[in-house]
Structures are given as C-alpha cells and as structure tokens.
Amino acid sequence: MTNSWTDIRNTDLVVIMGGNAAEAHPCGFKWVTEAKANRGAKLIVVDPRFTRSAAVADFYAPVRQGTDIAFLLGVIRHCIETDKVQWEYVKNFTNASYLVKDGFAYSDGLFVGYDEQKRDYNRTDWEYKIGADGFVETDPTLQDPRCVWNLLKEHIAVYTPEMVERICGTPKAKYLKVCEMIAETSSPQKAMTSMYALGWTQHSKGSQNIRGMAMLQLILGNIGIRGGGMNALRGHSNIQGLTDIGLMSNLIPGYMTLPVEREVDRSTYMSTRGFKPLRPNQTSFWQNYGKFFVSFQKAMWGPAATKENDFAYQYLPKLDVPAYDVLRAFELMHQGKMTGYFCQGFNPLLAFPNRAKLTAALAKLKFLVTMDPLETETARFWENHGEHNEVDPTAIQTEVIQLPTTCFAEDEGAVVNSGRWLQWHWPGATPPGEAKTDVWIMAQIHLRLKALYAKEGGKFPDAIRDLTWNYKDREDPHPAELAKELNGYVVETVADPSDPAKVLLEKGKQVAAFALLRDDGTTAAGCWIYTGCFTEAGNMMARRDNSDPDATGAYPKWTFSWPANRRILYNRASADMNGKAWDPTRKLIEWDGSRWSGYDVPDIAPTAKPDQVGPFIMNPEGTSRLFSRGMMRDGPFPVHYEPFEAPIANVIAPRIRGNPVARVFRGDMEQFGEAREFPYAATSYRLTEHFHYWTKNNHINSVLQPEFFVEISEELAKEKGIRPGGWVRVWSKRGSIKAKAVVTKRIRPLICDGKPVHIVGIPLHWGFIGAAKKGFGPNSLTPYVGDANIETPEYKAFLVDIEPISGVA
Amino acid sequence: MSDAIRPAPETPEPRVTVRRYSALTRINHWTLAGSFVLLTLSGMALFHPSLFWLSTFFGGGPTLRWLHPVFGCVLIVAWLFMFLRFAWANLPERTDWVWMTKVRDVLSGREENLPEVGKYNAGQKLVFWSFALLVPALFLTGLVIWDQYFYDWTTIPQKRVAVLAHALLAIGMITVWIVHAYAAIWVQGTIQAMTRGYVTGGWAWRHHRKWLRDLVSGRKRTPPATPAE
Amino acid sequence: MTITVNPPVAATAPAYGEQDLLRRSASSVPAPGRQLEAVSKLIDVSKCIGCKACQSACLEWNNLKEEIGVNTGTYQNPHDLTPNTWTLMKFTEWVNPQTDNLEWLIRKDGCMHCADPGCLKACPSPGAIVQYTNGIVDFDREKCIGCGYCVKGCPFNIPRISNVTHKAYKCSLCSDRVAVGQGPACAKACPTKAIVFGTKEQMKAHADKRIADLKSRGFDKAGLYDPPGVGGTHVMYVLHHADQPSLYAGLPDNPRISPIVEAWKGVTKYAGFAVIGLAAAFGFVHHLVAGPNKVTEHDEEEAARLTEGRSP
C-alpha cells in the first residue's frame, strides 16, 4: 500500500477491481464502511462476479477476467477526452512532459525490439531523450509529439467505450458510469483509492494491470494524498514482510537486488545502481544504495565483511537466470535437477499451478522437508486419498520429513500488514506437542551445517562459516535480537568530521534512522527500510498509542511504519508547487518557507524546496512514470493481452497469444487449451469463510463453508442441465475436478466480441486434509505460466469445460 | 338362554346376576381409562400454568413431555381394540330416537316411560361415538405436535392449528368423559359391570330390558365366541 | 455501542436477578424492583458483507458444536437455524425491478427479542422463558421441558429443539455478556460495524443516520425494522427496502403472534375450564335434584321372574 488501512476512511471513492476486499479482507474492509458511513464515500466494484464487496457497493460493473488493462486504459482515455485530468499534478509530478527516444514505437500489440524466439524485447529504445547536460529533455507545454503524454494518448486511442465493451463484456452504459464516477476525482478536492489484490496480480500481465490503475491515479492526482493511493491488499498477514525482507530468489532485504553472474565484483554491481538524477537539483534516493548494501553485508557477515574483501561481496550467490521463482523451482524438480526441497509455511501442492505436474515433481525429490503448524497436502502428496489424491505410494521414494512449527498466536515477533506497519505481537498460547518456532528450527539447521563444514570442510564454506550469529542463546535466538539486527546497529564509533570530539554514532548503539547508515562498514543493518523499528528508544513496533492528532487516520504512534514511520508514501505530492496542500482538508505535510512539516513524516528531504525537488525521489527523475522506460519486460505502457487461455482472440492484436514475453517452459505451451475445446472462462478466488488451505483444519470454518463447489450462472446451468447443489465435473487440458454446483444470479454470461462468454468460478479452499469435506483446488486445472515480470501464476483466467455428473464416491 | 345369566342362588337374598363384560373387555376398558386419566392429568399440566404442578407426579416437566404422547399411543391402541369390538353394538336403532326425545324422563330416571333398551342406550351410544371421533382426532393432532419424531412432517402454521385443535378436542373429550363417568355413578350398580363383569338382573331389567330379554331368549346378536357382550 | 468500547478487564459481578424480570413464562412475577434501560442490537443490512464472523463468534462464545454439513447450492451454511446455530447469515439474490440491478441481500437471522414475546406466552413451563426489563428474552434450559410450544409461539421461526438434549435453543442476546457490561459476541466480532449494540434509544438514533445515508444513495424506502405487531423488538434491522421486509429471506412484513396461538393461550384456556366445570357442576346438581338411579327390588323380581326356570 502507498497509504494505510486506516487512511481508506479518508477517501471519497473506493474502486475495488482486481480484488474482493469485503470477502478476502473483511477486517480491513471496515475502513471502507467507515468512509461510506461518515464521508458519504462511494464504492465501485468491477469484477467478473457479483461478490460480497459488490453486495455493499454503490455501483457494480462486470468485467471479463483478464481484460482489466483494456478497461483501465479506456478509463484513462475517457478522463483525457473529457478533460478530467489533475493538470498541475500531471505536468509537475509525472513524466508526461518528458521526450522519448525516436526509436521507440508501438504497433499491433508489440513494442519496438521484439524477439519472438527469445520471447523478449530489446528495450534500449524504451528510454527518454537525454540532453547534452545529462538530463531528460522535456516539453512542459506537452506539444511535442514525442513527449510521454502524446505517446500515451496515441497508445490508448484504440480503447474506445465500444472497444472496451467488445473486449471486457462490460455493458457500455455501466462502463461509462464507472468512468464518470472515477473522473470526478480529478478534482484536487476529491480522492479515490484503489484496492486490489490477487485479482490483478495472478495474470500473465499482472504487473501491468496494476500499472494501468497507477497511471490512472496519477492522471487524477490521487497518489500521495490522504484517501488516495494504490493499495495492494496483501493476501497473508505477513506477505508484506516477506517481500520487504527479500524472500524472493532475486532480492535481498529492502528491495535491493541480488547480483547476477556478470556482476563479478562490487564496483560492477554498483555501476548499474548509481541512479544519477535525471533532472536538475533532483534527489535520487537510490544513490544511497551503497550504504544500505554495505550495511546489509555487515549485518550478515560482521567482521568478515571488510573493505579489503569488497564487504564479502563474493559471499552472495550470483543469479544465472532472472529468478529462481516457484514455477522455475518446480520445473527444475520436474526435470530431476532439484532433488531436495525445504517447504517452510507453504502448501505448494495446492498453491502452485498444474497439480499433476507438481505431484510428479515432488515424487522425483530425494527429500522433502515441511515446516508447518498444520498438516498439509504437500506433506502428504504421496498418500493415496482416492480420487482426491490418486497416487501410488509404492512408486514414490521421496523421503518426507515433517517439522511441526508454532502458529502465529504461539510465538513472538512482528507482522507487517498491507499498510507497511510492523506490528509486534506476543504469544497468546503455548505451542502444542513438539512444535518449535521457525527461528529455533532454522538455528538448529544452521548450527549443524556450520559444524559439518567445520568438521568436513567443503567447496566454499565461508558464507556459512562467517555468518554473524551473536545471539544470547545460539540455539534459539530471540525475536527481539533478530529485530534489532534488522534495524541495524553501529559497528564502529563515528566521529563528526567537522568536530572530532563530537560522536555521531556510538559503537554498539542501535541506528535511529536509515539516513545514518554508511557505506564504510561502520554500520550494520539487516533491512534498511526497517531501520527505526527498534532503536535505543526501544521496540517501536510494540507501541500501542492510538492517538491520532486531528483525526487524519495516521496514528503516528501506533507501531512502526516503514520507511521512517511514514504513513503515506510520496506524501510530498499532497501539496502543490508552492508546498500548499491541494486540499486544505487533506493536509498531510506543507512547506512553511524553510521546511516541510505536518501530520506525516515528509517523503522528501525536510528542506527540499517545493519548486525544485520532485516528490517521487525513489525515481532518479523525481517524477512518477506514465512511461516506465525499460523497467518492465512487457512494455513501457500496458497493452491489452488476452490470458494464455482465452475464450476469444485478442481483438486488438489477433496474432498474439497471451503476454508475448511471459516465460513458458518447454512442454507447457502444448498444455494450454483452446476455446473450441474448453469453451468456458474460469477464474479462482477465496471465500470469506476460509483462509487459503489453513482453516479447513478448523471445525467452525468448516461448518461455515463445508464443501467444495463451483459457481455458474443460471444461464449456463440451464444450457448444461446442471441443477443447484448437484454434482459437476470441471476439466481443463491439465486436469479434472468434481464439485457441487452453486447456480447463481451473481455470475452472468458476458457478451465479448459478439459472443456470450460463460464464467465458471472456482474457490480454492479445499483439499484432502482437514475437517472440511474432501475436495479439490483450482490448481488441478490452472496453466503453468506466470506474470512476465514477477512470475505470479495465472490463476485468474483459464479455460475449462463443465458437465453435470451423478455424484462422487 | 345364554349362559351369561345365573339364576338366583338359594340364599337369603336371591339375586339373578348377568354377565356384562368379560375379563378381556374389562382390562381393555381400564387400560383405556387409565391412559385417559394419565393423559388428562399430564395434558392439563401442559394446558394451563396453574396446573403445571401436576408435572411433579410424572417425574417433572421433561419426563411429562415425553410421557404424554406415550400415554396417547397406549390409549389409541386400547381404543382401537375396543372400537372394533363394540362399534356394531353401538349402531343406532330407531328406538334410540324415541329414547332421546324423552330426555326429561331419562334425566329423571323414569325409565318406565322409555322404550326398552338393548345393550346400550342412545346416551351411551352418543358417548361411544363422541369418543370414536375425538380419540383419533386427538391422536392425529397430537402427532402433528409430537416434535421429537414428527417435527419435519408439518409446517409451523399447521402445528399451530394442531395445537389449538388438540386443546379444544381435549376439552371435548374431558367433557364427554365427565358425562360418561357421572352416568356410571348416577346409575347405581353400573360400575360393577366394569369391575366385576356382572350386573344384577334388576339392573339389566331396569336399564337394558331388551338386552336381558334377548339373553333370556337366546337371541344372541354376538358371535358365540363372545357371548352376551 | 459495543464495538467502540472495550470491556472492562476486571471481572464484574453479574448484574441481573429476579428483580429485573418483566415477564416469566407460565407464571407471574412481582412488579420489577427496578427498570433497566432498554437495550437493542441493530443490524445494518446495508453494511453487512456476509462474512459470517457473527456466526463464528456465536459458536465460539456459546461453546456450540455445529455439524460440518454439505453444500446444497448456496452460501448459506448451515442451511437453517439449528439448536447449535443461533444466528445465521441468510442470502437472497434479488433483481430490483426498478433498476434491473442485482442486489445480494444478506440478513443475519436470529432471535428478535420481541417486546411481546410469542415464545414466552406459549411456554407452559414456569420460568423456562424470561424477559428482562431491558428487553432481553432468555431461555432457562434448567426449566425447559422441550415441548416446542415456543416454536409455535414465535412469529419469526427462531427457537429450535435439540434432538439430543430435548431443550429449546435460541440467541440469548448474550445476556451473560450484557449482564456484565459487554455487548453480544456477534457485535464484538462484526468487522464492519454492521452489528452494533447499545440502548434502544441510541440504536434508533444511529439507525436514523444510517437511513439518511441510504436515502442519499437512492434507497428511498430505507428504514428501520422495529415491528409494532410484536411491540417492537430488541433486535432491529436497517433495511434498504424497509417497505418489503420479506425480500430479506422471508423476514415477516407484519409479524405478530399468530391469532391461533393467541386463541390457544387465551380464550381456549378459560373456555375449556368453563366447559369442563359446567359439565361437572351439572352432574353435581343433577345428583342433588334427581338422586341416584337405583335398581328396585321390583326390578330384581321382574328379572328373576323372567329368567325363572329357564336356566340351562
């Protein structure tokens, strides 16, 4: 989230698209109800299904799954056509006026530089024109045909209301109503918040779905203000923490990236991370990258990370591929190249696509270790559960080791919520049986590895051998110790260069803010964005002061919000070029002539002059990007691409299947189904009554939603002779499942490109373990392909067929 | 002549006795009567709060709630048995109308003014047929509100009608029973018919002369297996 | 209102007793010793997202064990109220003929705590159902005999009889929590404040604001459901279509205690006793006037004469 859960109450318009907040985030949704009840805010829901969010919406419009980009670019087009643009914001805070290289072009669904063989672009022309002074050339009048604004207008011209209706199946009148409601928030006195979740990410162009809305929000001037923002609703209580800490195969903590093979030393690594400002006087915050990186290395390897050894740069693994994401991991397992798998707090047998492939992959492992508080299907993948898990245990030689762990309510630590708040929690119950904390288990594994290396040596023991392990109880580090390490501490006392008698940083003390981190090895910080969470003043994450001066929704003394306890990112953008709030009732920070101050921690240097330094300091241009340069693999502007399995061909570029640069492994392309074979557009989702595959282990949740079902329209039910509550079989090219049928008015066939498209909804909470009735997950059916940028599997749009059956044994 | 009639023994007070009810019949009747009394008492406990104390005699409210329909089942079986055996003895005759028109004489006990009566007079027949209608009606309405086993068979509005009907029928039943019981008390010598099985010849002569004549003449209207009943 | 106020941490002594009873089934109570402030739960259907947190909280707080059922083609689980499910989200898909838009009406069903409680009036067991002066209608299962009369008395089809314990069950409005100054568990758990709890006056005022908001959103017929036919209720609904309560999974449009039940529990009792009494009195008087109908010696002789010499 750019903003926070509590800030949603400040909005005038909530758009839930690509998510289902009421259903999947019922507790957070309370802030939507607050906004509606106390501010008269309106709620729009755009979704293939009439969801529980839609049940309390002011306006609902259907959309075919996988066509959000066409919808959003259409709304942008509408706003520009009707002059509903926050002009001052767009001109000053976005790159609308920047000129783009002449080589950049787009036609027929593809940008310049496409290589069909590699399924990749050469992105060198997706770049600004850089002048002789080293800065971007701009045209503040927006007249130059090569400026971003005019390229954007040209790019979206095709998404007329008629085209949107043709692609998305959204009736034109409903679509225009949504456009009008959204366009109203271009006024500086109006704010719109976008609440989205996996309904946008789980597509082969998931990142671009989100960019579509981000661009719209920028055009409306809704980023950086109270009640505005791009608010990703995270699907697990600590999935935000997971990404912050860099638990992706290509990241290290604080959104820094792991080196790749060609970055042979630290200076090469840093050479592409210089982030020279692209505009005069601009702050480019990532210029501090080196400080955060060296502090991270010091936190990892302490005294073993020295200036002489490049701060242990070589201890870091170097990527030979863009990422070892989950799809690649299972692909490697399937190929027999990955033979051991540690599965910590994860149930991939139900969570990753194409279950048949997953089972085959797990069966090829030598060993599988699961660490989980619950019994999972993954741990039991070898066990025959009749039609619910038809495997032959005698043919599977994988050794499975199950390590029971504590549950969230049984241990201590911080959980990071969607609003970036690190909230400390304490155990509320004693762990059952032999359950141990994940920290204890990891410590045991680490210490045993260390001992093995010490005893037997190895090819490269250094990174393990030298890992900092300064905990009171080496066997069981305390969560507070780990938190302090993440926050960072002073390694060597640093004196003030101007006054050597004055100590700037005192050895052994906690670092108060990431601005104090240094690249000379005198500071250590495990995750720079968390610096400030556990200082000499104590554990800031444990704060429970719910005071909220002037009721802005900031709650600045409640826990700790990264970065620097900032509650709204880009909050400088809440004020105009003179530093005055666009809307005085939405004041966040203001310029008093010499400094920025207000309700929130300024997201800019406190003394940065408003007319000189742009608000988006994480970009070297200081502005936000309507044109994303070469940062995204699939284009600097979003393009409507159909899902890999779509009921109709891509109307704007019929030749292109799916996202042209999404990675497809050998053999998986052949497993994509065709619309003539599998005529119905399926999607998967959560229900309020359950949380993933956890709560089916709980009796009460299982009472509230006992049995696996699929949802279809009354029209499809009639066509197929399916009766409500009857059994159906649903199958794709990859698998087949059986389910009860819920026949509902909440799903209607959509007319897309002149043809009716029937939707089959498949919730995801059932498996063959637990209290609830045995069932299937949608992943038995879904295709093995992910987002072109971050490989999130395409769970939201695929093709199936359906038929009534007599029953299940 | 039927063997139901015993001539007067050679005793100081010679009496003719007439067998009216066999042991089986008496058991049948008293099963019926017993279950009826239990039903009445337990039903009254549920009918009016001021009588809820009666539930103490049934082991408390929950047990009473369980027992009441069980008594009902006993009664319906006993009653069915009785009905099948006595229905045709209670078929109306022409003389019944005459009997009924002379209700004043009936109430005053001036039976000499009444036509000679067979085994049952019109009043007894009326009581019989009242029971004949009330008992199954009570049983059926009772089933509708016997939620433990039959809840799903009917709707709540139907149950409401049933519970009201059950109460009204029970009132009717009790009223008829009062008539029945009072008549037995008023007409002296009647009760021993059901306790001992015999009445005196005088009782039969006075109240059911035609029946006595038939017995004497051997004109039995019942099958030989159950003589004189 | 419960949701904004955390309960006291220190234990509070239960505050209700005999002096707080307004009515007691099948018995009378003395005039209440004091008048508690009338409370009410307000369920704002327009804020409800159907998440079933209330259902879950109810099961948890009251320690109820419901069965894991099956799917019968609806989100409604269990499919009806049961002895263990005292509150249930009921889902109705309705196409508004005026707008042609689908509306998914989700109503939390459960005891309405009528001011004129049909269950209490129908109950034959003294004290098995009580009504407190704050409006809560509560079942005392120690005294319940499981007859099911409350089921027939209720205009909302709420009480359920257990086939295991043979006792009646329904929402108690968490009288145990309310008695120590807390609100019902469902209100506590509701994430969107669709369920709030407070004094009836507070709740009516809160409802007024909600209704004004709904009217501003085009729901001209929005209103409060506090049906006068049962004297008002201590569980009230804010409905977007208050003119058609039955849209919401058959919420009665004009609930009242069934006239049949009224007749059963009213006139029938008195009339019944009168008829029975009259019959008995008639017998008594008749016996006084007419005396016993005795067999005379003459009758015996006639009988003997008739049978003389004719023995077999």
Image (cartoon, rainbow, N blue to C red):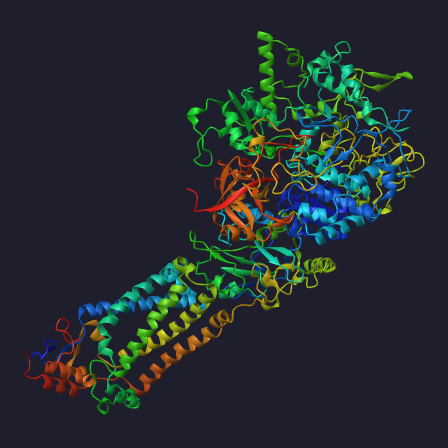
Q: Is residue A239 above or below residue C254?
A: above
Q: Residue at x 73, y 47 (%)?
A: A14
Task: Give the image quarter of residue A64.
Answer: top right
Asked whether, in this view, residue A224 is left or right of residue B149, the answer is right
Position of residue C306 relative to residue A677, above or below, is below
Look at the image and tell me in which quarter the C terminus of chain A lies: top left
Q: Is residue A105 left or right of residue C26?
A: right
Residue A280 x, y percent position in the rendering: 91, 28
Residue in view at x 82 percent, y 27 percent = A285
Q: Position of residue A534 (x, y in %)?
A: 74, 27
Q: How far from the left and from the top, in percent, is residue A382?
A: 47, 28
**Outermost residue to the bottom:** B113
Check the picture and name the quadrant holding the N terminus of chain A: top right
Pick the front one: B202 or A475: A475
Farthest residue to the top: give it: A456
Q: Quadrant of residue A7?
A: top right
